[in-house]
Image (tube, rainbow, N blue to C red):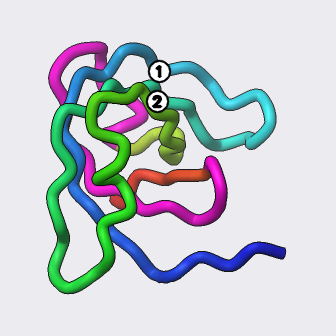
Amino acid sequence: MVQIVENHAEISGELLSVTPDTERPGFVVLDVQVTDARNVADFPNMFARDIGQTITVLARDGRAAANARPGPVTLRVKKTGPGMSFVEE
């Protein structure tokens, strides 16, 4: 099992789509084109390399991020493993 260091960032960008996660009940998939990734406190920012990229982030169904509509968005996020990122709410 791959372990990842505790990390947090605040990303901004364009929310392209929100769709139910077919593999994880209770979650939705957000596709975000990242334009900025800011540090949060003293935690490592593992999203700085994602600037200019479209990434997938998971959010719990029923939370604010899961109900967002396509357009500008700012989210506090963390990576939990290779290719796995979550919105923190």
The total of numbered circles placed on residues is 2
Quarter occupied by the N terminus: bottom right
Which residue position is annotated with label 1?
A: 18
Label 2: element kind? strand
Q: Position of residue 57 (x, y in %)?
A: 49, 41
Q: Position of residue 2 (x, y in %)?
A: 75, 73
Which residue position is annotated with label 2?
A: 30
Q: Please say whether residue 67 is one of the residues in the magenta stretch.
A: yes
- Few, some or many residues within 10 Å of mark 1 (<14, 14–19, 20+): many
Residue type, numbered disc 2:
Leu
Q: Nearer the viewer, residue 61 or 8?
A: 8
Label 1: element kind? strand
Q: Please say whether residue 29 is one of the residues in the magenta stretch.
A: no
Q: Which residues are magenta?
A: 64-83
Q: Position of residue 40 (x, y in %)?
A: 18, 71
Q: Earlier in the sequence, mark 1 or mark 2?
A: 1
Q: Residue at x 25, y 46 (%)?
A: 75
Q: Position of residue 8 (x, y in %)?
A: 33, 69
Q: Residue at x 28, y 81 (%)?
A: 43
- Few, some or many residues within 10 Å of mark 2 (<14, 14–19, 20+): many
